[in-house]
Amino acid sequence: MNATQEKLKAQVEQALIAAFGAEWKGVDPILVPASNPKFGDYQVNVALSLSKKLGKQPRAIAGAIALKLDVSEICEPPEIAGPGFINLKLKTAYLEAQLNAIQADPRLGVPAAKTPKREIVDFSSPNIAKEMHVGHLRSTIIGDSIARILEFLGHDVLRLNHVGDWGTQFGMLIAYLREVYPDALTTANALDIGDLVSFYRKAKLRFDTDEAFQETARQEVVRLQAGAEDTLHAWKLLCEQSRSEFQIIYELLDIKLTERGESFYNFLLPGVVEDLEKSGLLVENQGAKCVFLEGFTNREGEPLPLIVQKSDGGYNYATTDLASLRYRIQQDEAKRIIYVTDAGQANHFAQFFQVARKAGWIPDDVELVHVPFGLVLGEDGKKFKTRSGDTVRLRDLLDEAVSRAHTDLKTRLQKEERQETEEFINEVARVVGISAVKYADLSQNRTSNYIFSYDKMLDLKGNTAPYMLYVYARIYGISRKGDINFKELGSNAVLLQHETELVLAKYLLQLDEVISSVEQDLLPNRLCEYLFELSQKFNQFYDRCPILQAEEPQRISRLILCDLTARTLKLGLSLLGIQVLERM
């Protein structure tokens, strides 16, 4: 709820008490944005819900409330409509004052959190010795955007990359590394695996077809878990090689993360099992130590267990996740822990959250949130693959987007007969290509699957990053044409006269509400929708209102509206991890 809505809600609550008595204190006045702008900006719907309780007609109740309602500083006189709605229309002078106030505010009127919290966002999480692919795209982009928004609001955010850097597959990889790169184990900087996917596939083929190699791989797992120096060295080489590959992607996407892999929690795993045993939750089932869950059954309808220690004494993902959860609560002192993964893992999170709660490990003031997302589909509606049927490498996907943006820009420059440096073209193509991929993902409701289409995401029209980048660049084109420095426009100069100015002004003042809603529901697409609507409303204003040719004081007022729109777009896009361009 934005500041204006909060003020109006408080005033309606007071009017309700004044009209009908103190016993109505705390009743929700049901103040909502108006369903139709021609009736005003907000409507109060409480009269309809009170009719039976008060034994009066809703219109009579609405009239009594309106008589006691003092909103003269904010709104025109209240109007009763229909069966008992109270319509409220914001005063132009109030809107002007609000815009003048946020013009001097670098946060554009968005307040910081009243009670900042320690929050953890767990996202991206690729696996060592495997390249990042299209499946990592959504977690990485959505997680980064959520972290940016929480940071902007003043929360203490720990961005964690829970990489898969431990497990039985490392025995296979280390054994293969010894065979094909023996020098790497004794010579510094001798390792250059090259194509990590190819390396992994060759190791897997050896493991699947050679029983002697399988045994060697199993021994390497034992050596790794025991901390054998040469095996640990091989493991570290594999991790470092992968890390350098991951970092190329993270730099392309402008992502910052603190890596804390599965191996980080190894020393805590025995304690997890021991504490679950002490709490009486552990049950031995076919040699494995399990916790049986409520609400989860197998195909036969029998209760489903969560295994925390396998029959061979080994641990699994659930054990590591339980250990990491306890560490994040006890050591990191997190109050909200957000896991950004695909929707297919929803059951896993529900299960280990349930175990942690049953064990009493989750304090009342700690919130656990699984942020699920759908699949990335190809234009055929099936899981996004290469033509050969392989998973699309994330690096290739991003490079292709930049390459297409480069081609589109060159074509546009030819049509416009514009000459630009190669440096300019490369930079614009990079920003547009990467932004297009990010925005195409974030603009979807994350819970849904979406179809990946380069043509749609790079379109200069419609709900795309290039469209909004173009609106931003258009505003800076106005400043260049008029030789205007937006920072020197002064203050207290906004005058709203044209209808499109009023529409734009009202929308500019909704930014705080939108960001607040994303903080709560963790749906970045709401911010995307807002920025797209804002861009459209600015274009309507631009088409119908002269700006540089306007007479004073209209000219400076309209330039301030341009500046506020550009700053709002820049801030909003930055929270999505998207850069802006002053020229395109």
Image (cartoon, helix red, strand yellow):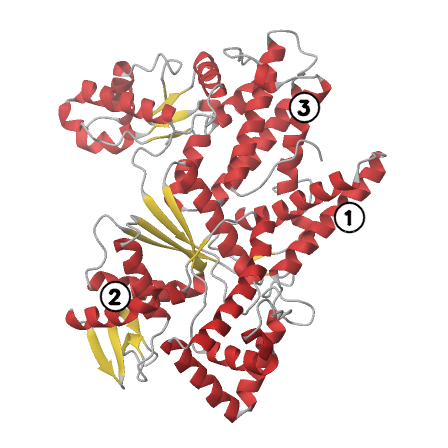
Q: Indicate which disc, 3 or 1, sits on the residue closer to the N terminus.
A: 1
Label 1 sits on residue: 407
Q: Nearer the viewer, residue 319 or 10?
A: 319
Crowd around label 2: few <14 · some 14–19 · many ≥20 (10 Å): many
Residue 118 in the figure: left or right of residue 150 = left
Q: Where is 87 relative to 356, above or below?
A: above
Q: Residue at x 25, y 78 (%)?
A: 289
Three-letter amino acid code of the residue under disc 2? Val
Label 3 sits on residue: 543
Crowd around label 3: few <14 · some 14–19 · many ≥20 (10 Å): few
Residue 157 rendering spot, x and y as whole percentages? 38, 45
Q: Residue at x 28, y 16 (%)?
A: 69
Three-letter amino acid code of the residue under disc 3? Asp
Q: Residue furthest top?
A: 552
Q: Residue at x 32, y 38 (%)?
A: 116
Label 2 sits on residue: 355
Which quadrant holds residue 537?
top right
